Amino acid sequence: MDSCNNYSYMMDNLAAEVGEFSGKIAKAKRKKMIRFTEDGNIEFTEDVTICEGLEFHSELMKEAGDILWQLSGLCHIMGWNLEDVAKMNLDKLASRQERGVIDGEGDNR
């Protein structure tokens, strides 16, 4: 679609999809379906059935796919390959870890 070649449209949609992802987690927290562990992971509360858990995971995966699709579209507009962007990020993080600065502030640490 022509709109997929429009930076502003794709950026707005990316923000919307991230919001939908976050919203699903917020609703699950509000309904006490999930809780966050001390190490920051999500776990289901005892009240959640297996079916509800699978549905929640499925819905989150769909939203993650939408986020990936929008990000891929933005990368295309910028002339970047999404795989190259991911590789560059992994290399950056590996370098930070090797130098002991993975936890810190600033883009160029």
Image: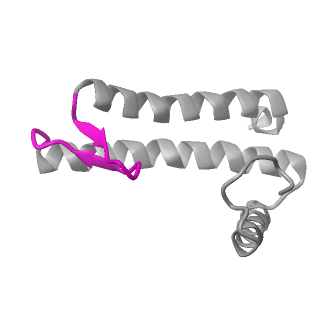
Q: Which residues are magenta?
A: 32-48
**Image quarter for residue 91?**
bottom right
Question: Which residue is at 75% across, 66% downward?
Answer: 96
As drawn, is 10 to the left or to the right of 80?
A: left
Question: Which residue is at 48% across, 41% downward?
Answer: 63
Q: Where's residue 64, x and y in %?
A: 51, 47
In the rendered image, the quadrant that contains the N terminus is top right
Q: Where's residue 81, x and y in %?
A: 80, 61
In the rendered image, the quadrant that contains the C terminus is bottom right
Q: How is the image coloured?
A: one colour
Q: Where's residue 97, x and y in %?
A: 69, 70
As drawn, is 53 to the left or to the right of 100?
A: left
In-front residue for pair 82/97:
97
Q: Where's residue 67, x and y in %?
A: 59, 43
Helix, strand or loop: magenta stretch: loop
**Image quarter for residue 108?**
bottom right
Question: Is 46 within the magenta?
Answer: yes
